[in-house]
Image (spheres, rainbow, N blue to C red):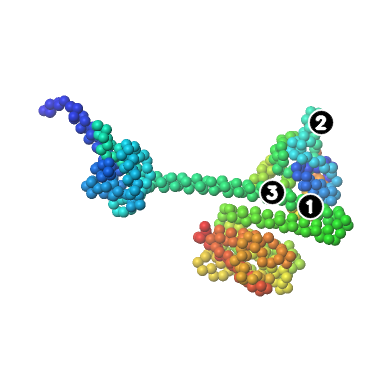
Amino acid sequence: MGQPPVAETKADRDWSQVALLSAIVSSSDDAIVGKTPDGEITSWNQGAERIYGYRAQEVIGQPMTLVCPADRVGEIQEILETIKRGERVVHFETERRRKDGTTFPASVTLSPVHDESGRLVGASSIARDITEQLELRNMAALRRRADDLDRANQKLDEFTYSVSHDLRAPLRAMSGFSAALQDEYQEVLGETGRGYAQRIQAAGNQMARLIDDLLQLSRVQRATIHLQPVDLGAEVAQIAADLQRGEPGRSVRFAIQRPVEARADRALIRTVLENLVGNAWKFTGHEADALIEFGTMPAQDAAVGCYVRDNGAGFDPAYADKLFQPFQRLHSASKFPGTGVGLASVRQIVERHGGQVWAQGAVDEGATFSFTLDARNMP
Amino acid sequence: MTNRPILLVEDNPDDEALTLRALRRNKIPNEVTVARDGAEALDILFPGEGAEGMLPGLMLLDLKLPKVDGLEVLRRVRANTRTRIVPIVVLTSSLLEDDVLASYHSGANGYVRKPVNFADFSAAVSALGVFWLQLNEAAPEYVPDYVPTSD
């Protein structure tokens, strides 16, 4: 026998409506909190228990400032003023404090609550922990910044190439026409005039080398590194042979340790060795019994430690650090030509291989350039 | 050995003068015609309606040119049956990898970066002239009504 059907009254319907709303509120993931116009907590849903860590019975009757970090208490007062004017506060981003004292980023929406006669009886707030949302937002910002940087680098590449292209044309004219003057107007110019034309030509050629070296430096800074096993000793031997072929008149002894295995980018490490061995070759130019050595040394933590040593002109150790800055030259161009960019490239490449480079020497007592490589420390 | 003329396509008057001087000093005997931009080069090669265009023994082509750029000139020369055989060497300041690649893919026979130092520049121009105009066997001119007599 079933119960006789009972007619549903308006009160019943109202009640079930309230129960439904209450179920929605209590099951929400957001912290839904009711408070008096003065900010005293009157209701506290399960979402609020989860987010703030307080049970309802712990906070009912407490001021809202309980979940506010000390430096933001003033904010609550401002919000309550807004509510008292009957206005809403929508998606206000701030910080809130959990029971354990930790804080989290929160997005808060507050609305005034009025009774049937329109009198302000309190406020309801919906707060959400937006930690993840902020992380996503930060990631998106980082990605945007990386894209911007890529674009900027590409622009810089294009700029570098177009500058080098445009700068070379007038230099070619300087070099070319001063050569023409020297060839075709020798007698008109006289010895002094020919000397001037020669200087113009030499300056043009020097500037062309500077541009090329700067281009190389900028390429080195941005080149992608492809690590592979390289025998540094074999590379040095090749470079030595090339130098000897270029100046067959010079007699230089080489002592090259082989093999010296390293993990490095072949093209870039070749640039390092070309610069160091090339310098040793250049600065032993006035040495009757020139000796250039390449070998390994203990490298502490690094994977590989090497040195290039010569018995040439050396340098004043007071300037050892300056050697690696672009355009720093410790010798006059007339004695040893160069642009002062080579060692700056060397340092860039070595550092990009997770290593360090340093120089030791004394005037007229040769120089030793040492470097380490360590793929594990690559930036 | 060919006595066809050289077509120098160059918009920079300094580079033009230096190239002409280098050719003269290296005793390359071929006549030289200069086009100052890509459009002028195309007019010389393809004058249109009845007129016969030039068939150079060597084209020295700069890439950055006013009006029609060097790559477009290259493509147009290669697309034409008569001029397809012309040796073209790109002579430019750029060492941009894209430019080198695009030049070869558009049909260049060579790519030379103009050296700044005049001695090197002169040596480069001389080497190009000697190889393409004296050592190299030039292709015979294309004859449209030519029918192979096989029987």
Residue name at image x 71 percent, y 51 percent: A168
Q: For mark 2, does the 10 Å Cα neighbourhood hold few (<14), some (14 to 19), or many (20 or more) residues?
A: few
Task: Residue A197 in the image: state x and y as whole percent.
Answer: 80, 57
Instruction: For residue B22, say whether it is visible.
Output: yes
Q: Nearer the viewer, residue B142 or A323?
A: A323
Distance from disc 1 to disc 3, alpha carbons, whole Å, reads 17 Å
Residue A19 in which image quadrant? top left
- What is the secondary structure assignment of the residue under circle 1? helix
Give the residue type that dot 1 points to.
Gly
Q: Do tag 2 and tag 1 residues touch (Cβ < 8 Å)?
A: no
Checking the image for residue A176, the label placed there is 1
Residue name at image x 26 percent, y 45 percent: A40
Residue name at image x 71 percent, y 56 percent: A207
Residue name at image x 80 percent, y 47 percent: B17
Which quadrant, please, contains the N terminus of chain A? Answer: top left
Checking the image for residue A165, the label placed there is 3
| Camera-nearest label, 3 or 2 | 3
Relative to B60, A120 lies left or right:
left
Checking the image for residue B51, the label placed there is 2
- What is the secondary structure assignment of the residue under circle 2? loop
Chain containing mark 1: A
Instruction: For residue B59, say whether it is visible.
Output: no
Task: Residue A95 in the image: state x and y as whole percent.
Answer: 36, 48
Distance from disc 2 to disc 1, alpha carbons, whole Å, reads 38 Å
Q: Nearer the viewer, residue A198 or B42?
A: A198
Task: Residue B7 in the image: state x and y as whole percent.
Answer: 79, 41
